[in-house]
Amino acid sequence: MVYFDAASGEPLDPAGREAYLAALDEGWAGPDRLYREGRRARMLLDAAREAVAEVLRCRADELVFTGSGTSAVHQGVLGLAKGRTRAGRALVLGAVEHSSVMHAAELAAARNGGERVLVPVDAHGRIRLESLTQSLAGLAVGLVAVQSANHEVGTRQPLREVAELAAGHGVPLLVDAAASLGREPVPPGWSVLAGSARKWGGPTGVGVLAVRKGTRFAADWPQDERERGWSPGPQNVPAILAAATALRARSAEQQEVGLGHRELTELLRARIPELVPDVEVVGDPDDRVPHILTFSCLYASGEALLLELDRAGFSVSSGSSCTASTLTPSHVLEAMGVLSQGNIRVSLPWSARREDVERFLDVLPDAVRAARPEAARDRREEAPASAAASAALEIDALGKLCPLPVIELGKRIGGVEIGGTVRVLADDPAARLDIPAWCRMTGQDFLGAEPLGDERPDAAAYVVKRVR
């Protein structure tokens, strides 16, 4: 098997593994104890904190370790929102933030009587600065949360500009840096920063939360005496030391490895559309983290494509609306307005090799072909010769899930004359993304969606004009 899902988690770095095994004998005791074993654990914990703080470019006493990257995000959002209630209660987030940020902000808004405001993004997933400016000017804002780069499509966010806008209004900036820590330098201007060790080759169960001195921050959870009360519970010192060691090792090599990964993802970006018909590569082609490449395939289920690639020996992930875990579109792809069906994310681990990428390109066409339903393989059926093309057509796809509504559209649009229209009745949530995307990819005109009335509030008629 070839592992291409590093954005979910990296295999443990060799240097980190070595540090972990060594620390099992020296760092097992509670670092808050005064006896010898506790003092040894405290020395290791302090050394790890100094090492991570150096990479994050912050003070060691601004940094705590949490039980996961998710915990770090939750505590960062909740603590910042709680500490800022007098200044403002609107929580302003980029529309493509990680779900952990979204969920924490929703809870914080409910607890503090505020609101969660989502700032729209462009088609690459980059936050719209003009919309952020409007939110900052028109609301009493408690925090702005913008990720360093998108976990799903890799697009970098304009953090320097965001930080300047937030600072100009006296609002702290929270940055979820999980997608870039260890791979790129930490951007400046943040007030609170969160990361996950498993994303840079550290062990699962370690997150980092950094809060700049002078930031209004108040724990909004049960506290104890450890880690200034910001991360309750005992610290796993061996795992923390392994995480710090892995981060230092990765940071030292990030430029060289990043150049190699960018070359490989550029190869994927160029070759996939040549090898696979009806595919859309999403995310910014240039301003992105080097190891993530995401594409979507018309007429395919993301789950089916993922399983076909698994059979071919590749572990990848899918943000598709058609996976087993959810029947709603990925909120990232939805905010970008891009195709959601047949979505695959390739994220290269530190040890990725060119030969593995080339083999992935070799097996991909067959995997996509197998993942597309048989009805999609001959989707451009022409109307029978004896039948005159009509000026309008209605397709009833109610009750049919992704990718069936688009397959039906692709098969039957030949039955209307050039300039004619097709109305696709659909209640699948993915249709609102996939039908416009199908039109964009096939050169047809999407005229809009019409509600079907109060009896079917979950459904709409999607109107397509045939132009070719």
Image (cartoon, helix red, strand yellow):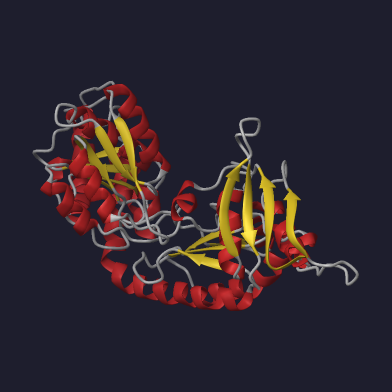
Image quadrant where residue 308 sits: bottom right
The residue furthest right is 386
* Location of residue 282 in the rendering, given as x and y in whole percent from the top left corner: 48, 64
Q: Is 338 on the left or on the right of 247, as rendered?
A: right
In the rendered image, the quadrant that contains the C terminus is: bottom right
At a point 51% along the width and 78% down the height, the residue shown is: 270
In the rendered image, the quadrant that contains the N terminus is: bottom right
Count of labels shown? 0
* Location of residue 461 in the rendering, given as x and y in whole percent from the top left corner: 64, 47
Image quadrant where residue 185 sits: bottom left
Image quadrant where residue 257 sits: bottom left
- Observer-nearest residue: 132 or 348? 132
The residue furthest left is 214
* Location of residue 177 in the rendering, given as x and y in whole percent from the top left corner: 30, 51
Can the viewer see residue 68 in this picture?
no
- Observer-nearest residue: 299 or 456? 456
- Observer-nearest residue: 208 or 423? 423
At a point 62% along the width and 51% down the height, the residue shown is: 462
* Location of residue 317 in the rendering, given as x and y in whole percent from the top left corner: 55, 55
Q: In the image, is residue 100 above or below residue 335?
A: above
At a point 28% along the width and 21% down the height, the residue shown is: 222
Can the viewer see residue 419 in this picture?
yes
Q: Is 319 on the left or on the right of 408, as rendered?
A: left
- Observer-nearest residue: 207 or 47? 207
